[in-house]
Image (cartoon, coloured by chain):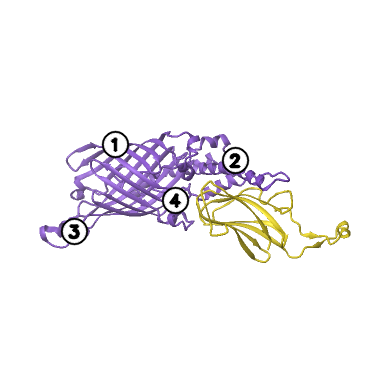
Amino acid sequence: MSLSKIFEFQNKKAAKALTPTLSDGICTYTFSCLWSPGKNLSLGVLVGRRVGDTQWQPIITNPKTDIDGEITVQVGSFPKGTKLELAFDIFPMEDIAACAVFITNITENVHKKLMPADGNKQLEKGKGWRDHFILVLF
Amino acid sequence: MRSILILTVTMLPLLLFAQFSRDLRTDRSGKLNMSVSEFDMFHNVSDRASTFPQQATIFSELDISSYDLLSANLSFSDKDQVQKVVIAPFRIMGATKNQWISNSKLNLSLKDKVTTIGVGTGWDNSSALSKESEMFRQLCFNKLGTVSIPQGATVDDVMQRIADFEKEKLISALIRYDSLRMLNVFKFSTGYNFQLFPVLFAQGGVSNFDSLNHFGLKSHNISGAATYSYNSSQIIVTASYNQIFERKSAEKGQILVPYYGPSINASIRLFKLLSYVKLRNTASFVKSRFIPSLNLGTSWEGKYPATGNNYKLYYKDNITRTDAFTPYVDILITPEAQFRLGFPIIRNEYAGSGDATSMGANIQYNFKISNLGN
Protein backbone atom coordinates (compact mmCIF):
# COMPACT_ATOMS: atom_id res chain seq x y z
CA MET A 1 0.00 0.00 0.00
CA SER A 2 1.69 3.19 -1.08
CA LEU A 3 0.04 5.50 1.46
CA SER A 4 1.24 5.00 5.04
CA LYS A 5 1.06 7.15 8.19
CA ILE A 6 3.93 6.66 10.55
CA PHE A 7 4.44 10.14 12.06
CA GLU A 8 2.47 11.86 14.76
CA PHE A 9 2.40 15.54 15.84
CA GLN A 10 2.23 16.05 19.55
CA ASN A 11 0.80 19.59 19.24
CA LYS A 12 -0.06 22.30 16.72
CA LYS A 13 3.28 23.98 17.16
CA ALA A 14 5.08 20.80 16.30
CA ALA A 15 2.85 20.39 13.27
CA LYS A 16 3.60 23.91 12.06
CA ALA A 17 7.31 23.40 12.46
CA LEU A 18 7.06 19.98 10.85
CA THR A 19 8.77 18.33 13.79
CA PRO A 20 6.87 15.10 14.14
CA THR A 21 7.59 12.16 16.36
CA LEU A 22 7.66 8.64 15.13
CA SER A 23 4.69 6.56 16.21
CA ASP A 24 5.38 3.76 18.63
CA GLY A 25 5.48 0.22 17.35
CA ILE A 26 5.71 0.79 13.63
CA CYS A 27 5.77 -2.54 11.87
CA THR A 28 5.76 -3.76 8.30
CA TYR A 29 2.87 -5.97 7.24
CA THR A 30 2.40 -8.40 4.38
CA PHE A 31 -0.68 -9.95 2.82
CA SER A 32 -0.30 -13.63 1.90
CA CYS A 33 -2.48 -15.93 -0.09
CA LEU A 34 -1.63 -19.60 0.48
CA TRP A 35 -3.07 -22.52 -1.45
CA SER A 36 -2.38 -26.13 -2.31
CA PRO A 37 0.83 -26.01 -4.42
CA GLY A 38 1.04 -27.16 -8.02
CA LYS A 39 -2.00 -25.18 -9.18
CA ASN A 40 -2.03 -21.82 -10.91
CA LEU A 41 -3.59 -18.97 -8.99
CA SER A 42 -3.69 -15.22 -9.45
CA LEU A 43 -4.02 -12.54 -6.83
CA GLY A 44 -6.06 -10.42 -9.21
CA VAL A 45 -6.82 -7.37 -7.08
CA LEU A 46 -5.70 -6.11 -3.68
CA VAL A 47 -6.73 -2.64 -2.55
CA GLY A 48 -6.85 -1.10 0.89
CA ARG A 49 -7.31 2.00 3.01
CA ARG A 50 -6.98 3.06 6.60
CA VAL A 51 -10.40 3.07 8.19
CA GLY A 52 -11.60 6.64 7.99
CA ASP A 53 -9.72 7.50 4.79
CA THR A 54 -11.81 8.24 1.73
CA GLN A 55 -9.32 7.05 -0.87
CA TRP A 56 -8.61 3.37 -1.57
CA GLN A 57 -5.04 2.60 -2.57
CA PRO A 58 -3.96 -0.20 -4.88
CA ILE A 59 -1.55 -2.48 -3.05
CA ILE A 60 -0.70 -4.34 -6.25
CA THR A 61 -0.72 -2.58 -9.61
CA ASN A 62 -0.98 -5.77 -11.67
CA PRO A 63 -2.24 -9.27 -10.89
CA LYS A 64 0.34 -11.56 -9.34
CA THR A 65 0.32 -15.18 -10.45
CA ASP A 66 2.13 -18.23 -9.20
CA ILE A 67 1.96 -21.98 -8.97
CA ASP A 68 4.00 -22.76 -5.85
CA GLY A 69 1.27 -22.19 -3.27
CA GLU A 70 2.14 -18.72 -2.01
CA ILE A 71 1.79 -15.13 -3.11
CA THR A 72 2.95 -12.57 -0.56
CA VAL A 73 2.89 -8.82 -1.10
CA GLN A 74 3.93 -6.02 1.20
CA VAL A 75 1.03 -3.93 2.44
CA GLY A 76 3.12 -1.24 4.12
CA SER A 77 4.46 0.01 7.47
CA PHE A 78 1.95 1.12 10.05
CA PRO A 79 1.76 1.75 13.78
CA LYS A 80 0.30 -1.13 15.69
CA GLY A 81 -3.39 -0.71 16.32
CA THR A 82 -4.06 0.97 12.98
CA LYS A 83 -7.34 -0.15 11.47
CA LEU A 84 -6.97 -1.26 7.86
CA GLU A 85 -9.67 -2.21 5.42
CA LEU A 86 -8.60 -4.50 2.60
CA ALA A 87 -10.49 -5.86 -0.41
CA PHE A 88 -9.18 -8.60 -2.68
CA ASP A 89 -9.96 -10.88 -5.60
CA ILE A 90 -8.17 -14.21 -5.59
CA PHE A 91 -8.67 -15.69 -9.03
CA PRO A 92 -8.01 -19.42 -9.49
CA MET A 93 -6.78 -20.54 -12.89
CA GLU A 94 -7.50 -24.13 -11.92
CA ASP A 95 -9.63 -25.81 -9.29
CA ILE A 96 -7.98 -25.20 -5.93
CA ALA A 97 -8.67 -27.59 -3.08
CA ALA A 98 -7.63 -25.28 -0.24
CA CYS A 99 -6.88 -21.58 -0.03
CA ALA A 100 -6.54 -19.10 2.84
CA VAL A 101 -5.49 -15.49 3.46
CA PHE A 102 -2.91 -14.45 6.08
CA ILE A 103 -1.53 -11.15 7.36
CA THR A 104 2.00 -11.14 8.74
CA ASN A 105 3.77 -8.60 10.88
CA ILE A 106 7.20 -9.25 9.42
CA THR A 107 8.90 -6.88 11.85
CA GLU A 108 7.94 -9.06 14.77
CA ASN A 109 7.47 -12.27 12.81
CA VAL A 110 3.86 -12.82 13.82
CA HIS A 111 1.15 -13.96 11.46
CA LYS A 112 -2.59 -14.27 11.65
CA LYS A 113 -4.97 -16.21 9.47
CA LEU A 114 -7.72 -13.89 8.38
CA MET A 115 -9.98 -15.77 6.02
CA PRO A 116 -11.78 -18.05 5.97
CA ALA A 117 -12.49 -18.12 9.68
CA ASP A 118 -12.72 -21.92 9.78
CA GLY A 119 -10.86 -24.37 7.59
CA ASN A 120 -9.86 -23.45 4.06
CA LYS A 121 -11.65 -22.10 1.06
CA GLN A 122 -12.21 -24.32 -1.98
CA LEU A 123 -12.02 -22.45 -5.28
CA GLU A 124 -13.40 -23.29 -8.68
CA LYS A 125 -11.48 -22.48 -11.86
CA GLY A 126 -12.41 -19.06 -13.25
CA LYS A 127 -14.54 -18.04 -10.26
CA GLY A 128 -12.76 -15.45 -8.15
CA TRP A 129 -12.85 -15.28 -4.36
CA ARG A 130 -13.83 -11.65 -3.79
CA ASP A 131 -14.04 -10.39 -0.24
CA HIS A 132 -13.09 -7.59 2.12
CA PHE A 133 -12.26 -7.26 5.80
CA ILE A 134 -11.29 -4.76 8.47
CA LEU A 135 -8.19 -5.56 10.44
CA VAL A 136 -6.69 -4.03 13.58
CA LEU A 137 -2.96 -4.33 13.04
CA PHE A 138 -1.24 -6.39 15.68
CA MET B 1 19.96 -49.98 -34.91
CA ARG B 2 17.11 -50.31 -37.39
CA SER B 3 14.64 -49.64 -34.56
CA ILE B 4 16.41 -46.41 -33.66
CA LEU B 5 16.36 -45.31 -37.30
CA ILE B 6 12.63 -45.97 -37.63
CA LEU B 7 11.95 -44.16 -34.37
CA THR B 8 13.98 -41.17 -35.53
CA VAL B 9 12.37 -41.00 -38.97
CA THR B 10 8.84 -41.16 -37.56
CA MET B 11 9.27 -38.70 -34.73
CA LEU B 12 11.89 -36.21 -35.90
CA PRO B 13 9.58 -34.13 -38.14
CA LEU B 14 7.20 -33.60 -35.23
CA LEU B 15 9.99 -32.69 -32.86
CA LEU B 16 11.38 -30.14 -35.32
CA PHE B 17 7.99 -28.66 -36.09
CA ALA B 18 7.10 -28.35 -32.45
CA GLN B 19 10.36 -26.55 -31.83
CA PHE B 20 9.95 -23.96 -34.57
CA SER B 21 6.19 -23.51 -34.33
CA ARG B 22 6.52 -21.49 -31.12
CA ASP B 23 7.25 -18.39 -33.22
CA LEU B 24 3.52 -18.18 -33.92
CA ARG B 25 2.84 -17.00 -30.41
CA THR B 26 5.82 -15.00 -29.22
CA ASP B 27 8.79 -13.29 -30.73
CA ARG B 28 12.36 -13.94 -29.65
CA SER B 29 12.16 -11.51 -26.78
CA GLY B 30 9.13 -13.34 -25.46
CA LYS B 31 6.73 -10.52 -26.40
CA LEU B 32 3.26 -11.62 -27.44
CA ASN B 33 2.76 -11.49 -31.20
CA MET B 34 -1.01 -11.84 -31.24
CA SER B 35 -3.65 -9.14 -31.25
CA VAL B 36 -6.91 -9.45 -29.33
CA SER B 37 -8.81 -10.41 -32.49
CA GLU B 38 -6.32 -13.15 -33.21
CA PHE B 39 -6.84 -14.43 -29.70
CA ASP B 40 -10.56 -14.62 -30.41
CA MET B 41 -9.78 -16.73 -33.43
CA PHE B 42 -7.89 -19.11 -31.20
CA HIS B 43 -10.58 -19.36 -28.61
CA ASN B 44 -10.91 -23.12 -29.05
CA VAL B 45 -9.05 -24.34 -26.04
CA SER B 46 -9.51 -28.07 -25.69
CA ASP B 47 -7.27 -30.99 -26.28
CA ARG B 48 -8.57 -34.27 -27.55
CA ALA B 49 -5.23 -35.77 -28.51
CA SER B 50 -5.46 -38.18 -25.64
CA THR B 51 -9.18 -38.87 -25.86
CA PHE B 52 -8.83 -42.03 -27.90
CA PRO B 53 -5.81 -44.25 -28.42
CA GLN B 54 -3.68 -42.63 -31.09
CA GLN B 55 -2.95 -46.09 -32.42
CA ALA B 56 -6.40 -47.07 -33.59
CA THR B 57 -6.44 -50.78 -34.29
CA ILE B 58 -3.47 -53.12 -33.94
CA PHE B 59 -1.74 -51.37 -31.05
CA SER B 60 -4.73 -49.80 -29.33
CA GLU B 61 -4.28 -51.88 -26.19
CA LEU B 62 -0.61 -50.86 -26.00
CA ASP B 63 -1.20 -47.15 -26.56
CA ILE B 64 -0.18 -45.15 -23.54
CA SER B 65 -0.47 -41.63 -24.93
CA SER B 66 -3.24 -40.45 -22.59
CA TYR B 67 -2.52 -37.29 -20.58
CA ASP B 68 -5.75 -37.30 -18.60
CA LEU B 69 -6.34 -38.12 -14.99
CA LEU B 70 -8.26 -41.15 -16.14
CA SER B 71 -9.19 -42.36 -19.59
CA ALA B 72 -11.36 -45.43 -19.97
CA ASN B 73 -11.92 -46.84 -23.41
CA LEU B 74 -14.16 -49.63 -24.63
CA SER B 75 -13.85 -50.84 -28.19
CA PHE B 76 -16.24 -53.26 -29.87
CA SER B 77 -15.79 -54.92 -33.22
CA ASP B 78 -16.76 -58.12 -34.98
CA LYS B 79 -13.34 -59.63 -34.16
CA ASP B 80 -12.57 -58.64 -30.62
CA GLN B 81 -13.29 -56.22 -27.83
CA VAL B 82 -10.80 -54.05 -26.00
CA GLN B 83 -11.38 -52.76 -22.50
CA LYS B 84 -8.76 -50.25 -21.56
CA VAL B 85 -8.02 -47.89 -18.69
CA VAL B 86 -5.14 -45.46 -18.48
CA ILE B 87 -4.79 -43.71 -15.14
CA ALA B 88 -2.31 -41.10 -13.92
CA PRO B 89 -2.06 -41.82 -10.17
CA PHE B 90 0.16 -38.88 -9.24
CA ARG B 91 -2.33 -36.44 -10.70
CA ILE B 92 -4.90 -37.63 -8.21
CA MET B 93 -2.49 -36.87 -5.41
CA GLY B 94 -1.41 -33.63 -7.09
CA ALA B 95 1.70 -33.61 -4.97
CA THR B 96 4.43 -32.97 -7.49
CA LYS B 97 5.58 -30.22 -9.79
CA ASN B 98 7.76 -32.62 -11.76
CA GLN B 99 6.07 -33.18 -15.09
CA TRP B 100 7.60 -36.60 -15.71
CA ILE B 101 6.23 -37.84 -12.39
CA SER B 102 2.91 -36.05 -12.80
CA ASN B 103 2.49 -37.58 -16.27
CA SER B 104 3.40 -41.10 -15.23
CA LYS B 105 0.57 -43.49 -15.91
CA LEU B 106 -0.63 -47.04 -15.65
CA ASN B 107 -2.14 -48.88 -18.57
CA LEU B 108 -4.50 -51.80 -17.99
CA SER B 109 -6.29 -53.42 -20.88
CA LEU B 110 -7.92 -56.62 -21.93
CA LYS B 111 -8.15 -57.78 -25.53
CA ASP B 112 -9.05 -61.24 -26.75
CA LYS B 113 -8.44 -62.75 -23.26
CA VAL B 114 -4.96 -61.25 -23.18
CA THR B 115 -4.21 -58.91 -20.29
CA THR B 116 -1.92 -55.93 -20.88
CA ILE B 117 -0.25 -54.11 -18.03
CA GLY B 118 2.00 -51.16 -18.64
CA VAL B 119 3.65 -48.12 -17.19
CA GLY B 120 4.68 -44.95 -18.93
CA THR B 121 5.41 -41.30 -18.60
CA GLY B 122 5.41 -38.28 -20.80
CA TRP B 123 6.11 -34.62 -21.35
CA ASP B 124 3.62 -32.06 -22.51
CA ASN B 125 4.39 -28.42 -23.27
CA SER B 126 0.77 -27.39 -22.64
CA SER B 127 0.97 -28.56 -19.06
CA ALA B 128 0.57 -25.83 -16.47
CA LEU B 129 3.81 -27.13 -15.01
CA SER B 130 5.86 -26.42 -18.14
CA LYS B 131 8.14 -23.40 -18.42
CA GLU B 132 6.30 -22.33 -21.54
CA SER B 133 2.99 -22.23 -19.66
CA GLU B 134 4.64 -20.15 -16.98
CA MET B 135 5.75 -17.68 -19.64
CA PHE B 136 2.19 -17.46 -21.03
CA ARG B 137 0.84 -16.97 -17.53
CA GLN B 138 3.13 -14.00 -17.03
CA LEU B 139 2.27 -12.60 -20.45
CA CYS B 140 -1.46 -12.86 -19.98
CA PHE B 141 -1.84 -11.79 -16.37
CA ASN B 142 0.99 -9.59 -15.31
CA LYS B 143 0.16 -6.50 -17.34
CA LEU B 144 -3.56 -6.20 -16.77
CA GLY B 145 -3.35 -3.22 -14.43
CA THR B 146 -5.77 -2.94 -11.54
CA VAL B 147 -9.15 -1.48 -10.66
CA SER B 148 -9.51 2.27 -10.56
CA ILE B 149 -11.48 3.46 -7.55
CA PRO B 150 -12.73 7.04 -7.26
CA GLN B 151 -12.38 9.04 -4.08
CA GLY B 152 -15.09 8.36 -1.56
CA ALA B 153 -16.11 5.00 -3.01
CA THR B 154 -18.09 2.81 -0.65
CA VAL B 155 -17.20 -0.81 0.04
CA ASP B 156 -20.06 -1.91 -2.22
CA ASP B 157 -18.70 0.27 -5.03
CA VAL B 158 -15.27 -1.23 -4.57
CA MET B 159 -16.54 -4.80 -4.60
CA GLN B 160 -18.58 -4.08 -7.74
CA ARG B 161 -15.53 -2.64 -9.47
CA ILE B 162 -13.50 -5.68 -8.47
CA ALA B 163 -16.25 -7.95 -9.87
CA ASP B 164 -16.20 -5.98 -13.13
CA PHE B 165 -12.42 -6.22 -13.30
CA GLU B 166 -12.64 -9.98 -12.89
CA LYS B 167 -15.27 -10.28 -15.60
CA GLU B 168 -13.57 -7.99 -18.10
CA LYS B 169 -9.92 -8.69 -17.48
CA LEU B 170 -9.19 -11.78 -15.44
CA ILE B 171 -11.57 -14.21 -17.17
CA SER B 172 -10.40 -13.01 -20.59
CA ALA B 173 -6.80 -13.42 -19.48
CA LEU B 174 -7.55 -16.97 -18.37
CA ILE B 175 -9.07 -17.81 -21.75
CA ARG B 176 -6.08 -16.30 -23.51
CA TYR B 177 -3.72 -18.23 -21.30
CA ASP B 178 -5.48 -21.52 -22.05
CA SER B 179 -5.67 -20.63 -25.75
CA LEU B 180 -1.96 -19.99 -25.94
CA ARG B 181 -1.18 -23.21 -24.15
CA MET B 182 -3.34 -25.14 -26.58
CA LEU B 183 -2.23 -23.43 -29.79
CA ASN B 184 0.83 -25.52 -30.55
CA VAL B 185 0.91 -28.51 -28.29
CA PHE B 186 3.67 -31.04 -28.41
CA LYS B 187 3.53 -34.19 -26.37
CA PHE B 188 5.90 -37.05 -26.00
CA SER B 189 5.20 -40.26 -24.18
CA THR B 190 7.10 -43.45 -23.63
CA GLY B 191 6.17 -46.66 -21.90
CA TYR B 192 6.66 -50.32 -21.29
CA ASN B 193 3.90 -52.93 -21.50
CA PHE B 194 3.75 -56.65 -20.97
CA GLN B 195 0.98 -59.01 -21.99
CA LEU B 196 -0.10 -62.16 -20.24
CA PHE B 197 -1.79 -65.27 -21.56
CA PRO B 198 -5.09 -66.27 -19.88
CA VAL B 199 -3.31 -69.13 -18.07
CA LEU B 200 -0.37 -67.76 -16.12
CA PHE B 201 0.98 -70.96 -14.55
CA ALA B 202 0.18 -74.54 -15.39
CA GLN B 203 0.94 -77.76 -13.59
CA GLY B 204 -0.14 -81.29 -14.44
CA GLY B 205 0.57 -83.43 -17.45
CA VAL B 206 -3.00 -84.37 -18.40
CA SER B 207 -3.50 -83.73 -22.12
CA ASN B 208 -0.17 -81.91 -22.13
CA PHE B 209 -1.81 -79.13 -20.13
CA ASP B 210 1.47 -77.90 -18.70
CA SER B 211 3.33 -77.88 -22.01
CA LEU B 212 0.44 -76.16 -23.84
CA ASN B 213 0.44 -73.45 -21.19
CA HIS B 214 4.14 -73.38 -20.56
CA PHE B 215 4.51 -69.59 -20.79
CA GLY B 216 2.55 -66.94 -18.96
CA LEU B 217 4.17 -63.99 -20.73
CA LYS B 218 2.76 -63.42 -24.21
CA SER B 219 4.74 -60.36 -25.12
CA HIS B 220 6.44 -57.25 -23.89
CA ASN B 221 7.22 -54.03 -25.66
CA ILE B 222 8.65 -50.57 -25.34
CA SER B 223 6.98 -47.73 -27.13
CA GLY B 224 7.32 -44.04 -27.82
CA ALA B 225 4.84 -41.57 -29.27
CA ALA B 226 5.13 -37.95 -30.31
CA THR B 227 1.99 -35.89 -30.86
CA TYR B 228 1.56 -32.44 -32.26
CA SER B 229 -1.80 -30.71 -32.05
CA TYR B 230 -2.69 -27.32 -33.41
CA ASN B 231 -5.21 -24.84 -32.07
CA SER B 232 -6.88 -26.90 -29.36
CA SER B 233 -6.66 -30.08 -31.37
CA GLN B 234 -8.14 -28.72 -34.56
CA ILE B 235 -5.43 -30.80 -36.18
CA ILE B 236 -3.61 -33.68 -34.52
CA VAL B 237 -0.66 -35.62 -35.90
CA THR B 238 0.90 -38.50 -33.99
CA ALA B 239 3.87 -40.70 -34.83
CA SER B 240 4.48 -43.76 -32.69
CA TYR B 241 6.84 -46.64 -32.58
CA ASN B 242 6.57 -49.94 -30.74
CA GLN B 243 9.33 -52.49 -30.38
CA ILE B 244 7.49 -55.69 -29.63
CA PHE B 245 8.70 -59.09 -28.51
CA GLU B 246 5.79 -61.48 -28.97
CA ARG B 247 5.17 -65.16 -28.54
CA LYS B 248 2.91 -67.02 -30.95
CA SER B 249 1.33 -69.13 -28.21
CA ALA B 250 1.89 -70.32 -24.66
CA GLU B 251 3.20 -73.67 -25.86
CA LYS B 252 6.56 -74.93 -24.72
CA GLY B 253 9.28 -74.14 -27.26
CA GLN B 254 7.79 -70.89 -28.54
CA ILE B 255 10.11 -67.91 -28.57
CA LEU B 256 9.61 -64.17 -28.25
CA VAL B 257 9.81 -62.91 -31.82
CA PRO B 258 10.87 -59.26 -32.22
CA TYR B 259 8.55 -57.04 -34.27
CA TYR B 260 8.75 -53.45 -35.52
CA GLY B 261 5.56 -51.49 -34.98
CA PRO B 262 5.49 -47.97 -36.47
CA SER B 263 2.27 -46.02 -36.77
CA ILE B 264 1.05 -42.61 -37.88
CA ASN B 265 -2.23 -40.97 -37.01
CA ALA B 266 -3.80 -37.73 -38.23
CA SER B 267 -7.16 -36.14 -37.56
CA ILE B 268 -8.95 -32.86 -38.06
CA ARG B 269 -11.92 -31.21 -36.40
CA LEU B 270 -14.64 -30.84 -39.02
CA PHE B 271 -16.92 -28.60 -36.98
CA LYS B 272 -17.88 -27.67 -33.44
CA LEU B 273 -21.29 -28.71 -32.18
CA LEU B 274 -21.82 -25.47 -30.23
CA SER B 275 -21.25 -21.84 -31.08
CA TYR B 276 -18.54 -20.10 -29.10
CA VAL B 277 -21.08 -18.02 -27.19
CA LYS B 278 -22.90 -21.16 -25.99
CA LEU B 279 -19.66 -23.04 -25.54
CA ARG B 280 -18.26 -20.41 -23.18
CA ASN B 281 -21.16 -21.02 -20.82
CA THR B 282 -20.77 -24.78 -20.61
CA ALA B 283 -19.24 -26.14 -17.42
CA SER B 284 -16.99 -28.58 -19.28
CA PHE B 285 -15.51 -25.78 -21.39
CA VAL B 286 -14.82 -23.59 -18.38
CA LYS B 287 -13.38 -26.53 -16.48
CA SER B 288 -11.30 -28.38 -19.06
CA ARG B 289 -11.82 -26.43 -22.31
CA PHE B 290 -13.71 -29.36 -23.76
CA ILE B 291 -15.21 -28.63 -27.20
CA PRO B 292 -18.09 -30.79 -28.43
CA SER B 293 -17.18 -31.54 -32.03
CA LEU B 294 -17.18 -33.91 -34.98
CA ASN B 295 -13.73 -35.02 -36.07
CA LEU B 296 -12.39 -37.00 -38.97
CA GLY B 297 -9.17 -38.97 -38.88
CA THR B 298 -7.17 -41.84 -40.14
CA SER B 299 -4.34 -43.96 -38.87
CA TRP B 300 -1.85 -46.37 -40.31
CA GLU B 301 -0.19 -49.06 -38.25
CA GLY B 302 2.36 -51.59 -39.38
CA LYS B 303 3.71 -54.69 -37.72
CA TYR B 304 6.70 -56.50 -39.19
CA PRO B 305 8.88 -59.28 -37.82
CA ALA B 306 12.41 -58.06 -37.26
CA THR B 307 13.87 -61.48 -38.02
CA GLY B 308 14.80 -63.45 -41.07
CA ASN B 309 13.10 -66.49 -42.54
CA ASN B 310 14.50 -68.77 -39.84
CA TYR B 311 11.78 -67.65 -37.47
CA LYS B 312 8.77 -68.19 -39.75
CA LEU B 313 7.64 -71.08 -37.58
CA TYR B 314 7.19 -68.71 -34.68
CA TYR B 315 5.10 -66.07 -36.47
CA LYS B 316 1.59 -65.80 -35.15
CA ASP B 317 -0.87 -67.20 -37.74
CA ASN B 318 2.09 -67.33 -40.16
CA ILE B 319 1.69 -63.60 -40.71
CA THR B 320 4.85 -61.95 -41.97
CA ARG B 321 3.48 -58.43 -42.31
CA THR B 322 0.39 -56.58 -41.15
CA ASP B 323 -0.77 -53.16 -42.26
CA ALA B 324 -3.87 -51.58 -40.76
CA PHE B 325 -5.42 -48.50 -42.29
CA THR B 326 -8.22 -47.10 -40.13
CA PRO B 327 -10.37 -44.17 -41.20
CA TYR B 328 -12.54 -43.01 -38.30
CA VAL B 329 -15.02 -40.44 -37.10
CA ASP B 330 -14.81 -39.10 -33.52
CA ILE B 331 -18.00 -37.72 -32.06
CA LEU B 332 -17.29 -35.73 -28.90
CA ILE B 333 -20.47 -34.69 -27.12
CA THR B 334 -19.43 -34.27 -23.50
CA PRO B 335 -16.34 -35.43 -21.60
CA GLU B 336 -18.42 -38.39 -20.48
CA ALA B 337 -19.86 -39.24 -23.87
CA GLN B 338 -17.37 -39.64 -26.66
CA PHE B 339 -17.58 -42.12 -29.48
CA ARG B 340 -15.33 -43.28 -32.25
CA LEU B 341 -16.61 -45.10 -35.27
CA GLY B 342 -13.71 -46.73 -37.07
CA PHE B 343 -13.45 -48.81 -40.23
CA PRO B 344 -10.20 -50.72 -40.01
CA ILE B 345 -8.87 -52.21 -43.24
CA ILE B 346 -6.29 -54.83 -42.33
CA ARG B 347 -3.95 -56.42 -44.85
CA ASN B 348 -1.98 -59.48 -43.82
CA GLU B 349 0.85 -61.15 -45.71
CA TYR B 350 1.35 -64.82 -44.91
CA ALA B 351 4.54 -66.84 -45.08
CA GLY B 352 4.57 -68.50 -48.48
CA SER B 353 0.83 -68.23 -49.08
CA GLY B 354 0.03 -64.77 -50.41
CA ASP B 355 -1.93 -62.09 -48.62
CA ALA B 356 -5.44 -61.25 -47.50
CA THR B 357 -7.26 -58.03 -46.81
CA SER B 358 -10.09 -57.82 -44.32
CA MET B 359 -12.39 -55.03 -43.31
CA GLY B 360 -14.75 -54.54 -40.41
CA ALA B 361 -16.30 -51.74 -38.42
CA ASN B 362 -15.61 -51.06 -34.81
CA ILE B 363 -17.07 -48.63 -32.33
CA GLN B 364 -15.28 -47.22 -29.33
CA TYR B 365 -16.77 -45.57 -26.32
CA ASN B 366 -14.55 -43.37 -24.26
CA PHE B 367 -14.87 -41.88 -20.82
CA LYS B 368 -12.28 -39.56 -19.43
CA ILE B 369 -11.62 -37.36 -16.46
CA SER B 370 -9.25 -34.69 -17.60
CA ASN B 371 -7.53 -32.07 -15.56
CA LEU B 372 -6.10 -29.73 -18.08
CA GLY B 373 -4.39 -27.70 -15.42
CA ASN B 374 -1.90 -30.40 -14.61
Residue A26 locus on image (x, y percent)? 73, 63
Residue identified by numbered label 1: B343
Residue identified by numbered label 4: B123
Q: Name the chain letter of the residue that bears numbered label 3.
A: B
Q: Name the chain letter of the residue that bears numbered label 4.
A: B
Q: Please, what is the three-letter code of the amino acid marked with disc 1?
A: Phe
User: Helix, strand, or loop for circle 1?
Assistant: loop
**Chain A: what color?**
yellow
Mark toward the start of the polypeptide (2 vs 1):
2
| Real-space Cα separation, disc 4 to disc 2, in angstroms | 33 Å
Check if mark 3's residue and mark 1's residue have beta carbons within 8 Å.
no
Q: Nearer the viewer, residue B317 or B84?
A: B84
Q: Name the chain letter of the residue that bears numbered label 1.
A: B
Q: Please, what is the three-letter code of the amino acid marked with disc 3?
A: His
Residue identified by numbered label 3: B214
Q: Please, what is the three-letter code of the amino acid marked with disc 2?
A: Glu
Check if mark 2's residue and mark 3's residue have beta carbons within 8 Å.
no
| Real-space Cα separation, disc 3 to disc 1, in angstroms | 36 Å
User: Helix, strand, or loop for circle 4?
Assistant: strand
Q: Nearer the viewer, residue B147 or B43?
A: B147
Q: Quadrant of residue B171?
A: top right
Q: Nearer the viewer, residue B169 or B1?
A: B169
Mark toward the start of the polypeptide (4 vs 2):
4
Residue identified by numbered label 2: B168
**Chain B: what color?**
purple
User: Helix, strand, or loop for circle 2?
Assistant: helix
| Real-space Cα separation, disc 2 to disc 1, in angstroms | 46 Å
Q: Is residue B200 left or right of residue A45?
A: left
Mark toward the start of the polypeptide (2 vs 3):
2
Q: Is residue B353 left or right of residue A28?
A: left
Check if mark 3's residue and mark 4's residue have beta carbons within 8 Å.
no
